[in-house]
Amino acid sequence: MKIAFFDTKPYDKPSFEKFGGERGVTFKYYETKLNEDTVELAAGFDGVCVFVNDTVNAAVIDRLAELGVKVVALRCAGFNNVDMKYAHGKIHVLRVPAYSPYAVAEHTMALLLTSIRRIHKAYIRTRDFNFSLSGMTGFDLHGKTVGVVGTGRIGRAFIDICRGFGMKVLAYDKFEAPNLADGDKIRYVGLDELFEKSDIISLHCPLTDDTYHLIDENSLGKCKKGVVILNTSRGALVDAEALLAGIKSRKVGAACLDVYEEESDFFFEDKSGHILEDDILARLISMPNVIVTSHQAFLTEEALSNIAETTVGNIVEFFELGECPNELCYRFGNTEDCKSGKCF
Ligand code: NAI
């Protein structure tokens, strides 16, 4: 099994070499992302392995199919970068549904604590032997209300962490998890109530037509003054322009973003010697109460190892058994995990 691996970073290779070597999958590593300009690099391969900012649109799918590529192996959970409707019947799409929800949930709490306890400021001050505490006042998380949108694997891991801090949880999900609600401690509510009553809002739902710009001028208007917005899910859940306006008007007390709507142009790359063209991102980063990490929440040793092991396992199952439980399928107007693995 020969796989063209796109958007390769140095930290990807060791675990993919290890698990690929053990199971007979060879990878050709390309630094470039997969898109219409680079798809020819997939010629002669059985499959492509892609990440969150590779483009798998209709044109790329058509060309991959013409080249005889059988499978798109996503080495991530989210699949908003794949045109799943168009892919149906043309190419099989496999993903890694879970690799370490703890990695993302813990990073979300790290961002929150860094922001509200001003750790990012303190680190810079003390390195300069500035031991002043002015402007460093934070607030306790204990007793605060966190609104969690999306109570899947990551959302639930984050709720557990928040409960450890003594926070009250208001949860919203399109499909509520059984046995999660717990009296006053964890309560499912409608989105409006979540916006109105939460001190902190954390997004853990996928990016879909329903959730696009979930945080926008309208929803921010319903929020408490000083609300803290956490987004470690997908950039386009937040209308960045509306968020910036909310920060300028002091409606939003702080924002912690691991993802950004236009991140594919910047994130994962060293742009330090360049002029940042995106004025909204530049302005957000310039704010003292905004912390941006560049889609780093997943990046732990455990997650990298799990991602490689599952991706390689998916590829082997697909080619050897003809079906894979982690195949995605677009049917009945919805993308879901494929039940049969044999829908085309
Ligand atoms: P999951 O599939 O376990 O949970 C997603 C939850 O969102 C489900 O409970 C689902 O019912 C809910 N949901 C679906 N549509 C919704 C809607 N319209 N409104 C509210 N909730 C809705 O997924 P998991 O593993 O918890 O991942 C969540 C998201 O985290 C992924 O979609 C991905 O975008 C993001 N992610 C970010 C990473 C990072 O490094 N920053 C790494 C991994 C995932």
Image: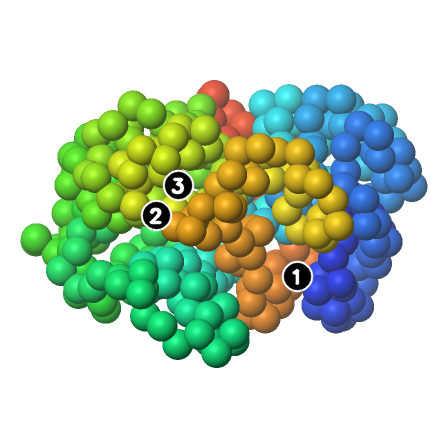
Q: Is 105 in front, or is 216?
A: 216
Asked if the beta carbon under badge 1 is closer than 8 A to the nearest atom of ligand 1, the reply is no
Residue at the image position 51 percent from the left and 57 percent from the top: 297
Q: Which color scheme does this rendered protein use?
A: rainbow
Asked if the beta carbon under badge 3 is closer than 8 A to the nearest atom of ligand 1, the reply is yes
Quadrant showing the C terminus: top right
**Is the residue 218 above or below the residue 77 in the image?**
above
| For the residues bearing labels 1 and 3, Cβ distance under 8 angstroms | no
**Nearer the viewer's eye, disc 2 or disc 3?**
2
Query: SS class of the residue under badge 2?
Result: strand
- Splitting the image into 4 quarters, where does residue 296 fall? bottom right
| For the residues bearing labels 2 and 1, Cβ distance under 8 angstroms | no
Q: Is 121 in front, or is 92?
A: 121
What residue would you read off at disc 2? 254
**Is the residue 295 above or below the residue 114 in the image?**
above
Residue 336 visible at all: no
Q: Is 245 in front, or is 311?
A: 245
Q: Where is residue 273 in the image (x, y as percent from the top left)?
A: 75, 50
The numbered dot on residue 308 is: 1
Q: What residue type is labelled 3?
A: Cys
Q: Which amino acid does label 1 sit on?
A: Ala
The numbered dot on residue 205 is: 3
Left/right of residue 267 with respect to residue 24 in the rendered view: left
Measured in 3D between alpha carbons, the distance from the residue under mark 2 to the one under mark 3, in whole angstroms, is 20 Å
Measured in 3D between alpha carbons, the distance from the residue under mark 2 to the one under mark 1, in whole angstroms, is 35 Å
